[in-house]
Each structure stands twice: as C-alpha cells, then as structure tokens.
Image (cartoon, coloured by chain):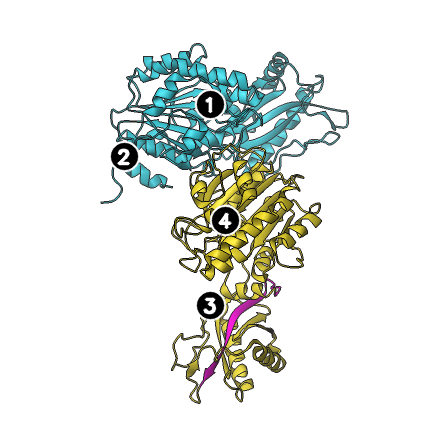
Chain colours: A yellow, B cyan
C-alpha cells in the first residue's frame, strides 16, 4: 500500500478526466444460477466491458464487511483503518450538517424511562419524525450552550437525532450512555481519555438539562447518546491527489462522505441515474474527477429484492451512454461493497471492478459481472488501490524513485 | 508482507540454486491485438511456461510506476518504501562508484551563468563527455577536500557528473541548488534537517570554489547539485536470506543496485543474453542465487520500438536453453516494471511472472505472456513477495511458528 506521503509527491494536476461510477452494493450472489448483474440485460455495460480491464476489489480486506463510511473512504483512496469516521460524525454527515474541527457529534435516541429513571423503551416507541422535530425545537430553545460550549441539535428521523457540542477543548473519546438493556438507568458519559473530561462533563450536564426539559413529555421523556466522535483530520483529495473533484449523489450520507474529502457537492434535480449523468454533462468542464453514486442497487439489496435490483442495473445501463459520450479519459465502474439479496445486508464479498482508458491491457471479459471480473487481468486488489490506478491511467502520477 | 525480522529467522542456506532472470521492462500493451511477448516467437519460453506456474507482480502497488531503483529493490526482496535510494546515490551507483556509509553523493550538472550569476543554460549546451572529463580533472585538482571533508568528482556523461563528499558528520538531507528555471541564480544548498548543517556548508563552499575554478571556462562556468543522498542501510541478501548471490548484468546501474544488497558482481564480456548466460555457466558452482539482468527489452520499450523489443525477447528465448541445461532448482522469469511501447516510458502495469521448480502447482498457461500470467495460478502479488516464494520453492525457508 503506497503511503499517503509518497503519493502526495507523485500526483500532478493534468487536464485528463476521470469518472468513478459507484453502484452501491451492486455485487451479489446467485439466484437460480445468476447474480443480478448476470440476470440484467446490459448491452451498454457489455460493450464497455469488452473495451475494459476487469478485476475485483476488497473494500477493506477479505472477509470484512464494511459500513458505507469505510467502504467509500477506501474508494476515495484513503486508508479506512486510519480514517475511521465515528458514528456521531457519520450521522451528522448523513443529514448534511457541516462539522468543524472543534465539534464533537453524537447520535441521539429519544427514549422512555420510569419514575426511578429506569429505561422502559430505548426508542420511545419510535415516535413520528414530526414529534421528534417538535421536541428538538423545544430542547434547542432550552439548551443553547453549556458553560460556553455551544449545543446544536438536529432531527434525523423517528426517534433519532444528532447532538453536536462545539467549543474549545472537546474530544470525542466519551463512552455511550445507552446501557443497551431495559430496566437500567442510562449510563454516565464517562471520559475514555483524560483529554475528554470536559466533553464528558458537558454531555452529563446536557443530559440533566434535557431530562428536565422533557420531564412532562410522553413517551419521549429522555434521550440516549452514542458514538461520540470528532471529525478525523483527512487531507483533501486536492491536497493528496491534486484533483479537482466533484460529487454527484442524491443521498445525503454519500454527499457528506464526499464532502469530508473535499469534493464539491453538485446539486442533483431528480434522482434517476439519467438525472445524475445530466449533472455530469453540465459540469464536465469544471472538474477533473467525478464520483457518481447510484444508491438503489444497495437499497434493493438491503430489501432482498432481486428483481428490482436487476431493474436498477438495467436503468443505469440505459443511461450509461450519457457518460460515455463525454469521452472520459478514464472510467471506472464498481460498487463500494456488495449487498447480496440473500443476505439483505452489506457483505464481505469483493466488488466487481471495471476500468477503461487508453492504456489498459486488453481483457477477455464479455460482461461486467462478478464472475467475469474474478477472471479479469486486474486480479483482486484492495479498493483503496483503485484510486492510484485511476490516476495512473489518467497519466496523473509521476514515477516513484529514479 | 512478511517482516524482515521474521524472514531472517526462517531462511537457511542450502545447496539448491535459484536463477532470477529479469527482462527489464518486458511487460507491455497490445499493438494490433498483441503485446511484444505475444508477438514474439518463443518456443523455449512456451515450453518453460507449460512446466511453470504463472502470475503477475506489482513492483510497488497498483497504479505506481517505479524507477529502476525501487523496482529492483522489490525484486531483491526488500520493502521499496523503506529502502529508498536517493538520486545522488543512484547516479554514483550507475557509474560503479563504491560508496561508504560516511558518504553523501549528489548529481551534478555543468551549467552556464552570466556575469551576474544568473543561469543561461542548465546543461551548459550538453558539452561532450570528453570536455566533462577535462573539467572534472581540473576541479579534482583544485578541490581535494573542504575543511577535512574529502571531495570526489566523477564524470557521468555529457554535462552530468557526480560529487561525493566523504567524512564524519555528513547527512544527505540537503536541498537542490538547481532552481529549475533560467534567469535565476542557483540556490544555496540549504540543510533540510539540523543534522545536515555541515553537509550544506561543505556543499556551499564547494560551489564557491568550483565557480572560482571554472570562471574562465565556456560554456560550463558553473555547476548545479541535486539529489543529495547517503547510502540507505540495507541488510545484505546474505544476512537476511542466507544466500550467496551473484549479479550478471551489463549496465552499471543494475550492477550498482545489486551491489547495494551485497551481490557479487560478475564480469560480463560482450553484452548479448548468450554472453550473460555463459557467465552463469562459468560461475554455476560458486553461488546459490543468480540475478541475471537483460536491459534491452526496456531500452526498446523506452524508444517505443515494438519490433526491436520483439527481437530482443526472441534473442533471450534462443539463449534460454543455456540456463535450463544447468538445471536450476528454481527459475523465475519476470520484469522489474513494464515499459510499454505506446507510453515509451516505465509504467504501472504489473509484470508477467513465471516460476518453475519441483514443487509448483500446475498451471494451464501455454505461453509466457501478460494475458496468460493474468490467468495464472499464482495470481497477482507484490513483487517484493517474489523472493520469499523463490526461497520457498528452493526449500530454503523453515516453517513459521510451531
């Protein structure tokens, strides 16, 4: 794995353009002898595959199932072990909250407790989002700051919210307050490092004041905090790779992840692949790296809905010429992780990976499928190494050593 | 990647013999559907491939194009990131200067400046080598030492020379003096670390005295220094791998690189593959590891000369029986990096790799080509891991752990 410090000295800015098309969770397993990629009718991908090199990438390493955070961090060319994105930060990112280096974010759950303070429902009966919004307005008015630390609260959905603490001297190493079982009182937010004492104390006071403000509410008369975290210090793609990168994604979490590595987040009207590719066309001149994210392959994988996953793949295939007409110097198509329908969840299976440029070695792949990619000339490699490969094919990397 | 400290405890000396045949830059891209390896008529390689296991190796990691230094350091079994060879050392190595641990070497360019000291030609009109030799004799007489630090100067070619500073307390972390643009004065050799203050000061005084000695010369009335570096502390192949290794190479840089890891450098008369293989035959009894380097596959790749690259491959093929008759226990054939004709330069594409021993798993490869190697049973792996694989196949590695 090439160290960041080295790739930074090798990368250079050139006019060549790279498109990285990510079909979230596209890799799958076979049903009646075929995966969704195999079952789909994909004349455009088939043609592209015959002009490309194929391979498989591991999001992290063999056997490891990643969340969306580390899977994308790898795809963007970063070490997913080094740059772990805490759950609080990911939750905030997922609702497009802009965090700064002085912030600590935590995931919140509205919950129910009895008169003795013992938890009776860790999700407060999954209150409706509108009720959550009313409670967040109430809390935001009641608790604007704690000893000079600003408190920012945002609704996510149903019982879920985000709490951000903003001020000097904060540190994310604080333990969860959720005891994970009913009949217990919520835990104190203990500092897990001496540097986190102030944050833990601030969180403790916040919980006290929250309980006071919610004491007449029902069923949401308390809240639990988990996944305290601050922003990791990630160098931008511009700093490391000399790229001017843009993100074309519909879902907030992926926009947020792209924002963490310094991509410009382009607005998308509509949410079909064709809508996204139209944004690519309109912004073609302004950037040299485009990350395009298609969500629904993953969504249908999570639902175990094989047939609809096939339909999304076919929809991307139909729109694909919109990208190819722009003649990118390098195009790669892949997933961030697999989401096989039989598992109805993310999995550890490697991602099919396709790469076309002027400088590829020919391959014999006839289609963009898991099996063809497993036989491809690119072999199997860590997803994190895909970005250097894209840069190389765009002639954006100098030689290492003399 | 197995750590050095571990492999050192596993390696053992045995009488079995390993031949590592490196065809520099042999990997390529297709022209009219064929790479040079595919286009060449290679009956001997074809037969060997059918008795071998095939695979692909990455010199550094996917997408990274290496210089000859890191590419060979990997092939010799060392971490190319840890053991980076500075340009000054490589230049000295390339003219077979023997450096010691107390030396700092820099690449020199004779250059031209005007009366105000502003550069008018960074290469002094590429003076002939003979003129360079005359100037180096003159400078060597004028500057034998600086405050007790010995100064050793050697001609490389045309305007290029090497300056070596030898003495106690030197350190290679000194900035280049070449401003890289005309119309500027050359830069002072600034220390990049406190430990390099003496080296920088010595270099500064050297430049002063060089300018004095050259003041009546034309066009080479000054010199620029770049790539200050000292020898990295590389453990020898004998120390790490218990090998008694020999190098059979014609070009000085590769002999120098082999010397850095402790290989004995065998003299080669002539420069054809057959000449090199004859040296192998004559020295067969004295060593248990032979690195044989064929340069011209790379040279023709750098020229973009597809047809001549094919001819060199065929020439190696014709001479191959000279190696095989010796019945090495292990033979590997590979490149150090690819040098595709369409790029006319080193590239990031992985190297075809062939391995034959008594203990290989069978393969289905019919030829030693990029595409057959991409389908080989060895898969794709870092070039640095090839050497442990050779040792294993020669039964020179003990079991790791009980």
Report the magenta residues as a range.
A97-113
Q: CA distance from mark 2 to mark 1?
A: 35 Å
Question: Disc 3 marks which residue?
Answer: A194
Mark number displayed over residue B397: 2
Query: How far is disc 2 from disc 3 in space, using C-alphas?
Result: 47 Å
Residue, disc 4:
A40
Disc 1: host chain: B
Q: Is residue B63 visible?
A: no
Q: Secondary structure at mark 1?
A: helix
Vertical arrangement, residue B274 with respect to residue B108, above or below? above
- The chain that hosts pointer 3 is A
Magenta part mainly helix, strand or loop? strand
Q: Which residue is mark 1?
A: B38
Residue A400 percent coordinates (x, y): 53, 35
Residue B137 in the image: above or below residue B28: above
Q: Residue furthest left?
A: B402
Q: Residues within 10 Å of mark 2 (few under 14, many from 20)?
A: many
Q: Earlier in the sequence, mark 2 or mark 1?
A: 1
Q: Decide: marks 1, 4 in contact (CB < 8 A)?
A: no
- Image quadrant holding the C terminus of chain B, namely top left
Taking the spot 62% from the left edge, 17% from the top edge, the residue there is B158
Task: Looking at the picture, tell me which residue is in the foreground, B377 or B186.
Answer: B377
**Relative image position of residue B38 (x, y in whole percent):** 46, 23
- The image position of residue B330, as x and y in percent, is 31, 25
């Amino acid at each position: 794995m090439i160290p960041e410090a080295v790739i930074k000295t090798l990368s250079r800015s050139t006019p060549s353009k790279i498109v990285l098309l990510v079909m979230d969770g596209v890799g799958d397993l076979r049903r009646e002898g075929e995966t969704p990629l195999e079952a789909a009718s994909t004349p455009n991908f088939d043609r592209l595959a015959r002009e490309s090199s194929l391979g498989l990438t591991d999001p992290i390493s063999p056997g490891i199932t990643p969340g969306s955070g580390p899977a994308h961090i790898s795809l963007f060319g970063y070490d997913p072990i080094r740059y772990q994105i805490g759950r609080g930060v990911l939750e905030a990112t997922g609702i497009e909250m802009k965090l700064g280096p002085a912030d600590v974010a935590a995931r919140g759950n509205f919950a129910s407790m009895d008169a003795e303070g013992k938890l009776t429902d860790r999700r407060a009966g999954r209150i409706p989002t509108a009720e959550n919004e009313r409670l967040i307005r109430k809390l935001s008015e009641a608790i604007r700051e704690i000893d000079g630390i600003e408190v920012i609260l945002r609704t996510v959905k149903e019982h879920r919210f985000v709490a951000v603490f903003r001020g000097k001297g904060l540190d994310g190493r604080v333990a969860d307050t959720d005891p994970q079982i009913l009949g217990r009182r919520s835990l104190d937010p203990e500092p897990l490092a001496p540097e986190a004492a102030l944050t833990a104390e601030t969180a403790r006071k916040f919980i006290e004041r929250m309980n006071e403000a919610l004491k007449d509410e029902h069923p949401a008369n308390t809240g639990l905090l988990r996944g305290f975290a601050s922003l990791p210090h990630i160098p931008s793609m511009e700093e490391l790779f000399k790229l001017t990168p843009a993100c074309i994604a519909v879902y907030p979490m992926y926009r947020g992840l792209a924002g963490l590595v310094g991509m410009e987040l382009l607005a998308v009207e509509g949410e079909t692949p064709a809508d996204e590719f139209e944004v690519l066309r309109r912004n073609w001149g302004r950037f040299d790296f485009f990350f395009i994210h298609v969500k629904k392959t993953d969504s249908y994988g999570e639902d175990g809905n094989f047939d609809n996953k096939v339909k999304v793949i076919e929809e991307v295939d139909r729109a694909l010429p919109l990208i190819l007409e722009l003649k990118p110097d390098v195009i790669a198509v892949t997933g961030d992780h697999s989401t096989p329908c039989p598992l109805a969840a993310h999995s550890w299976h490697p991602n099919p990976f396709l790469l076309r440029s002027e400088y590829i070695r020919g391959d014999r792949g006839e289609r963009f499928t898991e099996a063809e990619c497993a036989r491809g000339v690119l072999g199997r490699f860590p997803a994190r190494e895909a970005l250097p490969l894209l840069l190389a094919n765009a002639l954006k990397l100098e030689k290492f050593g003399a």
